Structure formats: structure tokens, C-alpha cells
């Protein structure tokens, strides 16, 4: 009997914990409210099944615990009941699956007006690159990366010249404008993840992966690495600042483009050469 | 064990028979020796090993932007001053299929309890296998001589060498193990272990010509794998 | 079992005896069972200490050997988890704990628990002990190979443990061993550590293949007379199907281990793209890290069911025996086990929704994954419907079963979160995942293992375990484990990523401090509670109540051996003949509330038994 | 009962059938070699390679490994797991193409 009571308290405790928990989602700051909705839906359906099954179990423990003079029922099968349960479960599962697939379809199809952002990850840090006036990012190669070309942009790619380079782990985003995050890594797996945006994807060396979201809340957010990447994994943080259009444009104007970087470097090299000559 | 008659059981053909066999007591594979069933299941598992190798190879080859070397040229051999594509591979295929044929006949004569024929054929299979391994060693040394390494090669994508050495190496290991067992079993056949039902060296199981069939299954499987390697690696 | 065994004669003797053994006035045909197809197995009986207890060919001894070795590694895994929880709950308390150590402990804990503890325990331990007994065989079909299988496993464990003592320590690449980081500097143990891990895994696979062939052929080809597949206890079904999965899934692990070893040792680039480390481009190029993930999870997902299916099977039997009621919907249970097993090969990439694979795979894998939820749910329904109108003995074994149902349903439901592709995106790589898989494939199977230990200990040792200690053990473990993993889901909702050595400098993660301390305390208690079992076993071995034959009044064959504990050869002179399924409990019209599988129909003419 | 008879014969078939299959294997190997010799390209090459490959594999399994004469229970146990491999192959084809596209697009072609 005690067992039944304790199991009941466990179930009750779980439900109460869920209701009164101080630990819950961070406030959402992107368009992926639909993800939260699918979680909520799954939560209600799944939680309901959990509570129902467990309460039924507790009931059985109370009602049918051992008595010397009683014999259990002998009923190997109940085709009808089994059929009903199968179909009910199938329906329930389908009801959970369908919204999931619909949202996933949105997730893999990026809106046309999304700004592309090249997120480059390494052990252990981030830096970012935005397309310039041609609205296109230049191609890159890991082999090209050096002090003069921190992003490894292919020098013969015309699209690369005007790319805006942000050699910082903090990136600014325009509020209410979709961004397509293009992830690449120069060494191991990483994952650019902002809990408030909900979305995430691994950065895989050797390929470029992507996902998209639309920030819709002005503020500063922390970027976490969400794929284990070696000893420094836990310390691999970055930042996102979501701004309105005006502030964003101002910030963007202050950033350096690739051609500016090359020009600056040429000046430095020129000066160095002169120094050597002197 | 293979001598055992199954009493009071009606064999039905096709899927009906399958349902009946599956639903029956004692055994699911009626009349199949334990060792033979084990070898089949092992080969199924091994099929997954080779499948994973070949799938990895496919994925690796499909996703490299570097030019994949043309196997027809890489594996060409000069015969009388003319480069013949895949000459050695063709001979190796020929040898392996020949040994597969002798093995099949060995199994047949084993069941007829024809000790001499069975023994000679197993020995012939072993020698065929040995020839194959020898030619593979030659092919490896030739490629290594030409600068192909597991990590690089002069013809194109570095994965070419990696997959080549790994997959043919794994297959060659299977062949070599097979050859060792073929020699052992040839000895056992000639020594009459199967006619006398002599027990195994490590086990209590009685000797029987079914062991030749079990070994045959393994050997044919090695040949089978080669068919796939030949198609995917050398011809593709 | 004598050398010149005259098979036909014995069979005739056996069958005529069974025929004449029927009750009065019954037609002799009623109890007829087909004669044996296969002559009795010759066994090698050990005669020295070494052949009897060390290099032993008796599946029961091998099973115990597997069990003890697995438990030994499990205790190491447990200690590692304590150290991890110490760091997470009370960072800095253990002075030696660096990030390197932390990640090494995480990795070794994961690998040990999944492969060397749970898999070896269920298949090697319970499989070896129970399969021959439950299907009515004298031993496994290839006892010698079976022995080699155990010693291979032993060597694999040795190699794994050796990696603690090599320079650089064991690998710290996470139990998934993802390249490139697994074999690159910057990850602890990327030198000898990872190599030993890969070698150990390969040895494990080879050893396991030997054992697995034994389990499969024993079930398929060496059942006793009258034992059809549909009369096997669900325990055997679970272990059998899990073994099938293992035979087909471990090849992928073997292949990925071999390829990664080559990447490490020879410098091939199977999984290694062009990589820039510390300002220098490495010699690698052109490989695909995602290929490894596919291979790994092609093994890894069936592996989940390799652990889960034996647990499903065993718990079905325990529930049925201890609620004195037939398992509800036996056929459905069997088909669910087989169906889950088959489907598990088509769902692997649901571990990879955010891995950067082809995004269109999400649709395929979300669908197949949620399909698998249906047979799994059916099993849950059938367990609770077995309790329904049963006659439930609330002993320790049953408590573990109830604990299993609660934790498994909880973990199964969170599995639907993670299997459904969009829901997975915010939750993957967070503590939600950790809570989920510990609940569903850590705690739930552990509950079954414990239940099974309390259930079969009387068979193995001939003495009962202490019930009082057992209840303490259960409640501490169940309540403790539940309070570790249930709140942990909510850390995942916050978005706390997994595999973080420290996490407190983020604003929304500071709220996790209190919970982490609580979880750590609970983990220490749960871990310590396991030593109650060890004490219980030692105590009961010495002074436990004598079990006698069939203390639980169960039906299946393992309780009907010639002696308790069973000797080598299991069933004395004559193998049992099976007439019914193992779930004839509380049959209307029968005197007792159980009816052993060997009961011939003529003995129970007046009852309404299931015609299987 | 006829099947029982057939069953008993499985191990000792006439030698002719083995020789036939043996010869056929040589011929098919020769054909697949000819595919390379004449340097067929594109779809024709692939389909011919696959055709000969599966034919050879089938012959070896069916006759040399006696699968043709085995009972369906064994045959089905051996062949059904191949669906998992087929699924793996199909998905890895898609994955390989996707990886190649990603590499070419972001590392070489651009735009």
C-alpha cells in the first residue's frame, strides 16, 4: 500500500513541479515561436499520457494487490482493446508529427530576403562576415587563412572583395529582418546557439551548414557553443546585439571590408619595407 | 547432426513452409546444421561490415571535389609493351572464381563422402586462394612503388589510396584467413577426420563433411565480396 | 550425453512415456510432442578449478563472469559520474578537477555505461545465463566459442582500463567520439587514449560477435521439444532480438573504429577535412566528419534498443510472474519487440537533426522515429494491462518493475520531443537530452536489471535476497534517480548546453546553481545506495533463506532444472518437454495459480487454457 | 513428401549444374571486363556494371552457396536485413551529393 502512495506522490510531485517551476524557457526573441508551440503541444499530449498511465498503474497497485483467496483474471488477449489503443496512439503520434514537419519545412527553407552571415568557428572562438554591397559572400578556403586574410576568402573571387569582416565574437543583427546563418569551422565541430533564438545547427569543417531565424526583440544575447569541441568548449562564448535599423546601419558603416583590410595591410607592408630599407 | 532425419514433420514449400518452419518447435531452419546456421548469420553480419566499408567509400568518393583517379588507368598493366586496363584484376577475378568453382565441387564430393576428390579440390581451392593473395601483394607493391599511399597518391583524390588499401586489405585478410582454414581442412579431409567423425581440436562437436560446406560458404562469400569490390572499385 | 548416444531409441522412450503419462480416460494423442530432431548435445565438463571456474564452457558460469565484469566496469562508471556531479554541483571543490579530467570522465562514463556495462550485462550476462535455461537447452550451441567471447570481452575491458594509465589519459572526446576533435590536439587523450578506446571497441565487437552467434543459434536451432518461438518467454525474445540488432549494428561501429584508427595512425582522411590548427594547415583533407556520425549512429541507435529490448522482455516476465497473471497481449508484445528492432535500423539520423547533414533527411527520420513510438506505446499499455485485475505481489521485484514503468514512460515521452525534428532543435545538445536518455536507457533498464537480480538470484545462488534491504535499495534508488533526472529536463528548457565544465557566468544559467547542487547530492545518495545491493548479495549468499525450487511459483523452464542452482547440462538426464506458453497463471479451473510449461494438456483437461 | 526428397538431394546435385554456373560466372566476369575495355560511359556503363554484378552475386549465392535449395525461412532471414543496407545506401547517395554541392558552392563556385 505504501508503495502505491509513494508512487502517487511522485506523479503528483512531477505535476506540481511543472506548474511551480522557476526554471523554464528564456523569453523567446526570434520568429520560432512555432517551435515553442510544438513543444507545448507535445508537452500536453505527452504529459497527459504520462500522468494517465502512471495513475492507472497506481490504481492497479491499490486495487489488485495480493490476496491469498483471489485469483487474477485469465485473459491472454483482447483484440478489440488492442486495436483501439493502437489506432489511438497512431493518431496521437501523427498529430504530434504533422506540426513538427510543417515547422521543419519552414526551418529548411530560408526566406528570400534573409541577410547571409558567415559564422566562422575555431577552437575556441567566433568571427563573422557579412556580404557587402553586392549582397553576396565570397567563397572561402581554409588553406587561404593567414594573418592578412583571416577569413580565408578566395582572392580571385570578385564577390569576396566587399565582404564586411567582423573580427570579434559579437555580431550585430537588424531587428525584424531574417538572417541566414552560414556556419563553417576551420577545425572541429561547433554549434552557434543562442537559447533565446531557439534555433541551432552544427558548424562542420569541410562543409558549410545553415539555418535561419528572424530576431524580433532588441537586446543583447549570449552565444554558446552547443557541440562539444574540445577542452575549451564551455568557454566558447560569443554575443549578439539586436538593434533597430538605424543603429544597425550605423554600426555596419563602421566595419571594415575585405578590400579595406587588404589596402591597410599593403600600407603596413609598404611601411615595413621602407623601414627595412632604411 | 546432418544425418539426423526429421521425423513426423511435413515440409511445405515456399512461404507456407516458411511460416510453418518458423512456427514449429525445436528448430527454425529445418535440417540445417548448427555450424552452418552460425556461418550464415556470421556472413550476414560480415555483409554489414563490407557494406559499411563500401558505403563509406561511396560517400567519400561522391563528396570529394578533387578528381577521382581513373581506375582503368591506375590498374593497367603492361603486357608485351601495351598497357592493358585492369589486366591483373581480371586475372585475379579469374583465379578467385576458379577457386570458388573448385570449392563448390569439393562440397559436392564431400557430401558424396568421396574423400580423395574432396580433399584434392579443397587443396586446389587453397592454392587458388594463395595465388590470389600473392597477386594482391604484387598489386599493392606495384601501387606503392608508383607512389600511392593510404594518405596520398599522385593521381588525384587522396581518399583513393585510403579506400583502396583499406577495402582490399580487409578483403585480403578474409582471403588469407580462408586460405589458412582451407589448408587445415584439406589435412582433416585427407586424414579422414570426417569419415571417422573425429571430434574437433577444441570442441566436442563430431566431425562431419558439413564442415566442408560451412567452409565453402565462407569461401563463396569472399568471392561474392570480390564481385562487389570489382564492380564498385575497379569498374565504376 | 554418453559418447555412443543412441538417439532414436531415447526419443521413442521419451515420447512413449509422455504419451502414457496422461491422466485417466484421456486420448494418448493429446500430449504428443514431436520427437527430437537433434541428438543430445555433448558437453565438455571441466574437472579442474581452471576449467570449471576460469576458462569454463558452461554458459551459466560465463554469464556470471560477464555479469561480474560488467558490474566492475559499471562501478567505475558510477564513480566517474560522482566526480562529474561533484564538479557540476560544487565547482572547485575537488581541486584536481580540470576541464581535461572532466571531459575524460564524461567520455569514459558514457562509453562504459552504454557498451561495457549495459550491453555486456544484458546480453552477455542475462543472455548467457537465461537463454539455454529458458529454451530448454543443455548449453549454448558452441560452448568453446562462447568462452572465447567472454575472454575477448575481458581483454577489451582491460584495454579500456589501461587507457586510464597511458600518457595523456583516456580519451575525452565524448562517448560519441566524433572526429575531427577525437583525434586532434585540444581534446584530452587524443593520443594513446583514443587509440586504446578504438582498439577496445573493436575487440568488444569481435568478442560480442562470437557470443551473439551463440545466442542466436541457440534460440533458433536448439530449443527443446514443444518449444515453439511463440512459446518462448519474452525475456528470450528481447535478448534474441537485441542480439540480432547487435549482429547487424556492431559492424558499423567496427568499420568506423577501423577508419578512425587509420585516420589517427596512418594519416588517412576518411573523416578529416582540411583543418587549420594553431595557424597551420594539417596534412588532412577532403574527408567528411558527418560520415562518421552516420556510421556511428547506424550503430548507435540500434544500440539503444540493444539495451532496451532485453529490458522490455525481462520486465514483461517479471510483471507477469509477480502479478500472477498472464502477460497481456503476448503476440502483440512479440511483434512489438520485433517491429521495434526492425525499425531501429531506419531511424539513426534523428540523433543528427542539427548536425549539418542534408536537411531534407529531417522529414524522413522524424516520420520513422515517431512510427517507432507506436509499438513502444503498445508495450507500455500491455504492461499496465497485465497489472490490471492481476493479483499483485508488492515485493521488491515488483517495485522495480513499477519503477521501470514510471521512468520508462517518462523517458519515452521525452523521446517523442527529441524524435520530432522541430521540437528537437531547441532541445538538442542541452541537458534535456541528458535527462531523456538517462531516464530511458539508464535508469529504466537499471530498474529492470535490479528487478532481475532480485528475481533470479534465488536461482543462481539458491538463496533469497533480503527483502527489507531490497526495499531500502529500491526506494533510495528510484526516488533519488527520479529527482536527479526529472528536474534536469528543465535545465534543458532553459537552454543549458550539455558537456559544459562550468556554466555559471551566463545570466540565465545562474538560476541552475541550486538545482545542480540538489542533483549532485541526489546522485551521491543514489550511487551509494547501490552498495546496499552488494551488501545484500554478500549477506544473503551466507545466511539468506534457502530458496528451494521455484520460489516465485513461475512457469518458465529455468525454474525446473534438476538442481538449484542448476548444474552443467541444466536438466539432468532428460530435457523437459514443453506443452504451453510460459504465462498460464491463474488459469480458471486449475488448482494452483500457476501452470509450468511442462504441464501436459492431459493433466489439466478441465481448465480453460490458452491454445498456443 | 516430394519436398523431403528434394531436401535430401540438396547436397548432392548433379555436377553439371556446378559446371554450368561456373562457366556462366566466367562469361559474366568477361562481360563486365568488356564494359571497361570498350569504355562505355554514363548511364549505360553503370547499369551494365550493376547488372552483371548482381547477376554474378545472385548466381554465387543461389547455387554455389545453395541458397536456391534452402528453405524460405533461411533465405528470408538472410535477405530482409538488406533493406537496411539499401536504405543506408540511398540516404548516403543523397548525403554525398549534398556535401559535394556544399563544397563546390561555398569553396569554389560561389555566387
Image (cartoon, coloured by chain):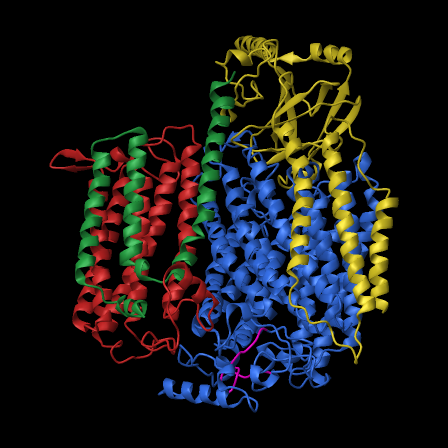
Chain colours: A yellow, B red, C blue, D green
Image coords of residue B218 (percent x, y):
32, 60
Q: Is residue A212 left or right of residue D79?
A: right
**Residue depicted at 86% across the width and 64% down the height:** A5
Tell me the quarter of the picture where residue C239 sits. bottom right
Question: Which image quarter holds the N terminus of chain C?
Answer: bottom left
Q: Is residue B178 left or right of residue A249?
A: left
Q: Is residue C283 visible?
A: no
Observer-nearest of C549 and C43: C549
**Residue depicted at 65% across the width and 18% down the height:** A114
Main secondary-structure element of the magenta-colored stretch: loop
**Residue depicted at 60% across the width and 47% down the height:** C371
Question: What span is in magenta?
Answer: C564-581
| Residue C575 belongs to the span the image colors magenta | yes
Q: Is residue D31 left or right of residue A80?
A: left
Question: Which image quarter holds the C terminus of chain C?
Answer: bottom right
Image coords of residue B192 (percent x, y):
23, 77
Image coords of residue C389 (percent x, y):
76, 68
Q: Is residue A239 visible?
A: yes
**Residue depicted at 44% across the width and 79% down the height:** C34
| Residue C371 belongs to the span the image colors magenta | no
Image coords of residue C192 (percent x, y):
53, 51
Task: Report the label total.
Answer: 0
Observer-nearest of A212 and A246: A212
Above or below, B106 relative to C497: below
Above or below, B18 relative to C284: below
Above or below, A51 relative to B206: above
Tell me the quarter of the picture where residue C361 sits. top right
Amino acid at each position: 500500500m505504501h508503495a502505491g502512495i509513494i508512487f502517487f506522490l511522485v506523479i503528483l510531485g512531477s505535476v506540481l513541479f511543472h506548474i511551480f517551476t522557476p526554471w523554464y524557457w528564456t523569453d523567446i526573441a526570434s520568429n520560432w515561436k512555432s517551435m515553442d508551440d510544438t513543444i507545448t503541444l507535445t508537452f500536453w499530449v505527452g504529459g497527459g499520457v504520462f500522468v494517465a498511465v502512471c495513475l492507472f498503474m497506481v490504481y492497479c497497485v491499490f486495487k489488485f494487490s495480493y490476496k491469498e483467496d483471489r485469483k487474477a483474471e485469465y485473459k491472454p488477449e483482447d483484440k478489440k482493446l488492442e486495436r483501439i489503443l493502437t489506432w489511438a496512439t497512431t493518431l496521437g503520434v501523427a498529430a504530434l508529427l504533422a506540426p513538427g514537419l510543417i515547422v521543419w519545412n519552414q526551418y529548411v527553407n530560408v526566406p528570400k530576403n534573409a541577410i547571409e552571415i558567415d559564422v566562422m568557428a575555431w577552437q575556441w572562438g567566433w568571427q563573422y562576415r557579412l556580404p557587402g554591397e553586392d549582397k553576396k559572400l565570397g567563397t572561402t578556403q581554409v588553406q587561404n587563412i593567414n594573418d592578412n586574410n583571416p577569413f580565408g576568402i578566395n582572392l580571385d573571387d570578385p564577390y569576396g572583395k566587399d565582404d564586411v569582416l567582423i573580427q570579434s565574437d559579437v555580431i550585430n543583427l537588424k531587428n525584424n529582418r531574417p538572417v541566414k546563418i552560414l556556419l563553417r569551422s576551420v577545425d572541429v565541430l561547433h554549434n552557434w546557439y543562442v537559447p533565446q533564438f531557439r534555433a541551432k545547427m552544427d558548424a562542420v569543417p569541410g562543409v558549410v551548414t545553415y539555418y535561419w531565424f528572424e530576431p524580433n526583440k532588441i537586446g543583447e544575447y549570449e552565444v554558446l557553443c552547443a557541440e562539444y569541441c574540445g577542452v575549451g568548449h564551455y568557454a566558447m562564448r560569443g554575443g549578439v546585439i539586436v538593434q533597430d535599423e538605424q543603429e544597425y546601419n550605423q554600426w555596419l558603416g563602421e566595419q571594415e571590408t575585405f578590400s579595406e583590410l587588404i589596402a591597410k595591410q599593403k600600407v603596413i607592408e609598404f611601411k615595413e619595407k621602407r623601414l627595412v630599407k632604411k | 547432426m546432418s544425418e539426423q532425419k526429421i521425423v513426423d514433420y511435413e515440409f511445405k514449400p515456399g512461404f507456407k513452409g516458411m511460416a510453418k518452419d518458423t512456427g514449429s518447435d525445436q528448430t527454425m531452419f529445418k535440417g540445417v546444421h548448427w555450424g552452418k546456421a552460425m556461418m550464415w548469420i556470421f556472413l550476414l553480419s560480415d555483409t554489414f561490415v563490407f557494406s559499411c566499408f563500401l558505403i563509406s567509400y561511396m560517400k567519400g568518393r561522391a563528396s570529394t571535389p578533387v578528381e577521382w583517379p581513373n581506375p582503368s588507368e591506375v590498374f593497367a598493366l603492361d603486357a608485351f609493351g601495351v598497357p592493358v586496363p585492369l589486366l591483373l584484376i581480371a586475372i585475379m577475378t579469374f583465379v578467385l572464381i576458379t577457386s570458388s568453382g573448385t570449392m563448390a565441387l569439393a562440397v559436392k564430393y564431400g557430401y558424396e563422402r568421396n574423400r580423395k576428390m574432396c580433399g584434392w579440390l579443397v587443396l586446389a581451392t587453397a592454392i587458388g586462394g594463395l595465388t590470389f593473395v600473392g597477386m594482391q601483394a604484387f598489386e599493392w607493391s606495384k601501387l606503392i612503388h608508383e607512389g600511392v599511399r593510404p594518405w596520398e597518391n599522385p593521381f588525384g583524390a587522396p581518399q583513393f589510396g585510403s579506400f583502396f588499401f583499406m577495402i582490399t586489405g580487409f578483403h585480403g585478410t578474409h582471403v588469407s584467413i580462408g586460405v589458412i582454414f582451407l589448408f587445415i581442412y584439406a589435412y582433416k579431409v585427407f586424414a579422414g577426420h570426417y569419415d571417422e567423425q573425429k571430434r574437433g581440436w577444441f570442441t566436442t562437436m563430431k566431425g562431419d563433411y558439413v564442415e566442408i560446406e560451412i567452409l565453402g560458404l565462407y569461401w563463396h562469400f569472399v568471392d561474392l565480396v570480390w564481385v562487389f569490390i570489382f564492380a564498385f572499385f575497379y569498374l565504376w | 550425453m554418453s559418447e555412443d548416444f543412441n538417439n532414436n531409441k531415447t526419443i521413442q522412450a521419451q515420447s512413449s512415456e509422455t504419451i502414457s503419462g496422461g491422466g485417466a480416460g484421456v486420448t494418448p494423442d493429446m500430449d504428443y510432442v514431436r520427437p527430437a530432431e537433434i541428438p543430445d548435445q555433448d558437453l565438455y565438463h571441466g574437472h579442474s578449478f581452471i576449467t570449471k571456474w576460469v576458462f569454463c564452457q558452461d554458459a551459466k558460469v560465463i554469464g556470471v563472469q560477464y555479469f561480474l565484469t560488467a558490474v566492475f566496469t559499471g562501478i567505475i562508471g558510477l564513480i566517474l559520474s560522482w566526480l562529474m556531479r561533484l564538479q557540476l554541483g560544487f565547482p572547485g571543490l575537488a581541486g584536481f578537477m580540470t576541464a581535461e579530467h572532466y571531459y575524460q570522465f564524461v567520455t569514459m562514463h558514457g562509453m562504459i555505461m552504454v557498451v561495457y556495462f549495459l550491453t555486456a550485462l544484458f546480453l552477455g550476462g542475462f543472455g548467457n545465463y537465461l537463454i539455454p535455461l529458458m529454451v530448454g537447452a543443455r548449453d549454448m550451441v558452441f560452448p568453446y566459442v562462447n568462452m572465447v567471447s567472454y575472454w575477448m570481452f575481458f581483454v577489451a575491458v582491460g584495454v579500456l582500463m589501461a587507457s586510464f594509465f597511458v600518457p595523456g589519459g583516456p580519451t575525452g572526446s565524448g562517448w560519441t567520439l566524433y572526429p575531427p576533435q577525437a583525434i586532434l590536439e585540444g581534446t584530452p587523450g587524443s593520443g594513446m587514449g583514443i587509440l586504446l578506446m578504438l582498439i577496445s571497441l573493436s575487440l568488444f565487437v569481435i568478442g560480442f560477435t562470437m557470443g551473439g552467434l551463440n545466442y542466436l543459434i541457440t534460440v533458433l536451432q536448439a530449443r527443446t521439444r514443444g518449444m515453439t518461438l511463440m512459446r518462448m518467454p519474452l525475456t528470450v525474445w528481447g535478448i534474441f532480438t537485441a542480439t540480432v540488432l547487435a549482429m547487424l549494428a556492431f559492424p558499423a561501429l567496427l568499420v568506423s573504429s577501423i577508419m578512425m584508427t587509420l585516420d589517427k595512425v596512418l594519416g588517412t582522411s576518411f573523416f578529416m577535412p582540411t583543418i587549420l590548427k594553431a595557424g597551420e594547415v594539417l596534412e588532412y583533407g577532403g574527408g567528411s566528419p558527418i560520415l562518421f556520425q552516420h556510421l556511428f549512429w547506424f550503430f548507435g541507435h540500434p544500440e539503444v534498443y540493444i539495451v532496451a529490448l532485453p529490458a522490455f522482455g525481462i520486465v514483461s516476465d517479471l510483471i507477469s510472474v509477480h502479478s500472477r497473471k498472464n502477460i497481456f497481449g503476448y503476440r502483440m508484445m512479440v511483434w512489438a519487440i520485433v517491429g521495434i528492432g526492425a525499425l531501429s535500423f531506419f531511424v539513426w539520423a534523428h540523433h543528427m537533426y542539427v548536425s549539418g547533414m542534408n536537411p531534407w533527411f529531417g522529414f524522413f527520420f522524424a516520420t520513422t522515429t515517431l512510427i517507432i513510438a507506436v509499438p513502444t506505446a503498445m508495450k507500455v499499455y500491455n504492461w499496465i494491462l497485465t497489472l490490471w485485475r492481476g493479483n499483485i505481489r508488492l515485493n521488491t521485484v515488483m517495485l522495480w518493475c513499477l519503477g521501470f514503468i514510471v521512468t520508462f514512460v517518462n523517458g519515452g515521452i521525452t523521446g517523442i520531443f527529441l524524435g520530432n525534428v522541430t521540437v528537437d532543435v531547441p532541445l538538442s545538445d542541452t541537458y534535456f537530452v541528458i535527462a531523456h536518455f538517462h531516464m530511458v536507457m539508464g535508469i529504466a533498464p537499471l530498474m529492470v536489471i535490479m528487478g532481475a537480480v532480485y528475481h533470479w538470484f534465488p536461482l543462481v545462488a539458491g538463496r533469497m535476497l533480503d527483502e527489507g534491504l531490497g526495499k531500502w535499495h529500491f526506494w533510495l534508488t528510484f526516488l533519488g534517480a527520479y529527482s536527479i533526472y526529472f528536474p534536469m529536463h528543465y535545465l534543458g528548457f532553459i537552454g543549458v548546453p550539455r558537456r559544459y565544465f562550468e556554466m555559471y557566468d551566463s545570466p540565465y544559467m545562474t538560476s541552475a546553481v541550486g538545482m545542480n547542487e540538489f542533483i549532485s547530492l541526489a546522485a551521491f545518495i543514489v550511487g551509494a545506495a547501490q552498495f546496499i545491493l552488494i551488501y545484500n548479495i554478500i549477506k544473503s549468499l551466507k545466511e539468506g533463506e534457502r530458496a528451494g525450487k521455484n520460489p516465485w511459483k513461475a512457469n518458465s523452464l529455468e525454474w525446473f532444472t534438476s538442481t538449484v542452482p542448476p548444474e552443467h547440462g541444466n536438466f539432468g538426464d532428460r530435457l523437459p518437454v514443453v506443452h504451453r506458453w510460459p504465462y498460464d497463471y491463474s488459469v480458471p479451473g486449475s488448482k494452483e495459480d500457476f501452470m509450468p510449461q511442462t504441464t501436459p494438456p492431459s493433466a489439466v483437461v478441465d481448465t480453460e487454457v490458452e491454445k498456443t | 513428401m516430394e519436398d523431403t526428397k528434394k531436401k535430401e538431394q540438396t547436397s548432392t546435385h548433379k555436377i553439371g549444374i556446378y559446371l554450368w554456373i561456373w562457366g556462366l560466372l566466367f562469361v559474366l566476369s568477361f562481360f563486365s571486363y568488356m564494359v571497361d575495355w570498350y569504355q562505355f560511359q554514363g548511364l549505360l556503363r553503370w547499369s551494365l556494371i550493376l547488372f552483371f554484378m548482381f547477376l554474378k552475386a545472385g548466381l554465387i549465392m543461389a547455387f554455389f552457396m545453395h541458397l536456391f535449395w534452402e528453405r524460405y525461412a533461411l533465405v528470408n532471414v538472410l535477405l530482409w536485413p538488406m533493406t537496411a543496407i539499401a536504405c543506408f545506401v540511398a540516404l548516403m547517395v543523397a548525403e554525398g551529393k549534398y556535401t559535394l554541392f556544399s563544397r563546390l558552392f561555398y569553396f569554389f563556385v560561389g555566387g
